[in-house]
């Protein structure tokens, strides 16, 4: 992005506001002089990693008003600019703040615009947001400005520090700035001096992107187009998902006038656990076009995902990089509906098949003549192998993860050679049932690859100790394990290397690696 040249405020305004917030609008306290260039903004944004996907927060103002936005915005007008920190500004009810508008926007139907009129001399419109950033990253936004160059314009602050200025006639452009983890106050203030008015005498903002935030979504759940898999257990259901999107479907809704109309909504696959419960809920997702697909799930209520929300809200997810995901949930809650939505992160549309199983308790004596656990004949090989006596579980080295109160998200990523599986259990080490040979874990990712990823969040992420075990189907197998735990204070990450091996004796103690 090319640097811009700006002028200082007039001497008269500089004297009037001497020692105050604005100083010369150009660069009173910036690295360059009043006649110098604006600091160069970052030209590129590092692409989101798999660990970040689905947690980026975007404010596109499509809610139609600041009051309906999920972000805690504050806006007001000011007439006394003689302060050194914009966080000390006092609202003036006679001066307008910012408002959501539906014209001249960069994208979508809505954006936000400063509220000053050409008559509001020596006044400002402030837009402010205080939030907790969970992971260091960048804030980016699109900005447009129409004003007298060097005398009126928009100033952006982070925690009271002036970061950048836009003055003159500037079409839509993107700005990006680094942000550390922790609580921050982001402020945009459009100010006007005296007399001259140019263009709209205003600034516009749109598509503000934040790093992951400690911010809850509204409780309301949007309408969902549902495919109930409960009566179709064990039978593949075909579907499709557009590039860079989540599964969408058509929903029939009733209008206030009593008529019905078809609307597009998130399409989610549901499985309801019967009253007598089940030992395992397993879901298999397979791409028919060879691309990467990811699977998100939530217990009790549907998953929230864009565009109905600005991020994915789920209890668990399988995010391995291939086109096959198998998510296994042990002892699902009776009489509870589990919801699943499919994401296509590729640049091309994909078709897929999704299959669900609810498996009853495997009784003692269910082993066949070969000494292995008997499983239904229609199970895919990776899932059937998961239920039979394991060939590679468990290295005596397990990973113990202490999850504190208030934790937001646990991500575990596994990368290695051959076929590796990933198992998580709360409170006790992952084990093998001595009678059935079955893995004892709460959540498992068992796709037929060497790459697995599990996300726990929401109701499934508890305060306490989790044990993580890696299964190698043909040990010894090399692997790299990455664990990332997100709390209100930020994200802690640890990357470790290791090797699977056969268990020489089930009675040997577990060697726990602390995280």
Image: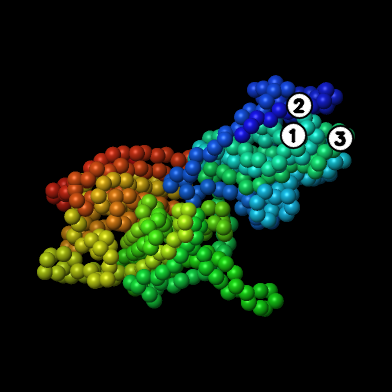
Residue nearest the observer in this picture, 202 or 173: 173
The span from disc 2 to disc 1 (Cα, nearest Å) is 9 Å
Q: Are marks 2 and 1 in contact (CB under 8 Å)?
A: yes
Residue lying at 62% horizontally and 47% vertically, measured from the top left = 207
Q: In the rendering, which numbered label is found on residue 427?
A: none
Secondary structure category for the residue under label 1:
loop
Residue nearest the observer in this picture, 54 or 394: 54
Q: In the rendering, which numbered label is found on residue 167?
A: 1
The reply, left or right, for residue 401 in relation to residue 372 is: right
**Res 231 → quadrant:** bottom left
Of the numbered discs 2 and 1, the one sitting upstream in the chain is 2
The span from disc 2 to disc 3 (Cα, nearest Å) is 15 Å
Q: Are marks 1 and 3 in contact (CB under 8 Å)?
A: no
Locate the C terminus and report the quarter of the image it occupies: top left
The reply, left or right, for residue 305 in relation to residue 336 is: right
To which residue does mark 3 refer? 196
Query: Residue 223: x percent and y percent?
Result: 56, 67
């Amino acid at each position: 992005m090319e640097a811009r040249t700006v002028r200082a405020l007039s001497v008269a305004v500089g004297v009037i506001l001497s020692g105050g917030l604005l100083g010369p609008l150009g660069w009173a306290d910036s690295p360059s002089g009043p006649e110098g260039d604006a600091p160069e903004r970052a030209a590129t944004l590092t692409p989101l990693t798999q660990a970040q996907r689905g947690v980026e927060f975007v404010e596109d103002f499509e809610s139609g008003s600041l009051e309906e936005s999920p972000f805690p915005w504050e806006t007001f007008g000011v007439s006394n600019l003689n302060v050194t920190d914009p966080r000390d500004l006092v609202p003036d009810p006679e001066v307008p703040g910012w408002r959501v508008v539906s014209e001249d926007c960069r994208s979508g139907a809505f954006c936000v615009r400063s509220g000053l009129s050409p008559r509001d001399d020596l006044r400002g419109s402030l837009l402010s947001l205080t939030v907790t950033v969970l992971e260091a990253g960048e804030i980016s936004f699109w900005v447009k400005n129409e004003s007298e160059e060097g005398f009126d314009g928009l100033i952006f602050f982070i925690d009271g520090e002036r970061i950048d200025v836009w003055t003159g006639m500037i079409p839509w452009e993107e700005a990006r700035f680094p942000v550390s983890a922790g609580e921050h106050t982001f402020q945009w203030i459009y100010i006007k001096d005296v007399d001259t008015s140019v263009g709209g005498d205003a600034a516009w903002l749109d598509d503000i992107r934040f790093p992951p935030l400690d911010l809850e979504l509204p409780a309301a759940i949007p309408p969902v187009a549902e495919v109930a898999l409960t009566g179709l257990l064990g039978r593949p259901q075909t579907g499709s998902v557009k590039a860079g999107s989540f599964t969408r479907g058509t929903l029939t809704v009733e209008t206030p006038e009593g008529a019905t109309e078809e609307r597009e909504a998130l399409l989610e696959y549901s499985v309801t656990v019967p009253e007598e419960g089940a030992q395992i809920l397993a879901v298999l997702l397979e791409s028919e076009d060879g691309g990467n697909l990811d699977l998100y799930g939530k217990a009790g209520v549907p998953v929230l995902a864009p565009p109905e929300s600005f991020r994915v809200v789920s209890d668990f997810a399988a995010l391995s990089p291939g086109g096959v995901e198998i998510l296994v949930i042990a002892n699902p809650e009776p009489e509870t509906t589990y919801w699943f939505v499919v994401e296509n992160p590729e640049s091309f549309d994909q078709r897929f098949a999704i299959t669900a199983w609810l498996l009853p308790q495997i009784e003692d004596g269910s082993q066949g003549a070969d000494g292995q656990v008997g499983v239904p004949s229609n199970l895919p090989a990776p899932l059937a192998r998961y239920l039979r006596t394991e060939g590679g579980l468990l290295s005596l080295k397990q990973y113990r993860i202490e999850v504190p109160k208030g934790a937001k998200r646990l991500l575990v990523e596994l990368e290695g050679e051959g076929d590796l599986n990933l198992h998580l259990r709360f409170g006790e080490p992952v084990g093998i049932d001595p009678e059935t040979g079955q893995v004892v874990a709460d959540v498992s990712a068992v796709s037929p690859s060497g790459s697995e990823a599990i996300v726990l969040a929401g109701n499934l992420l508890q305060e306490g100790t989790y044990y993580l075990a890696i299964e190698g189907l043909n040990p010894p197998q090399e692997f790299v394990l990455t664990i990332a735990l997100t709390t209100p204070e930020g994200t802690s990450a640890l990357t470790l290397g290791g090797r699977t091996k056969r268990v020489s004796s089930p009675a040997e103690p577990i060697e726990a690696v602390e995280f």
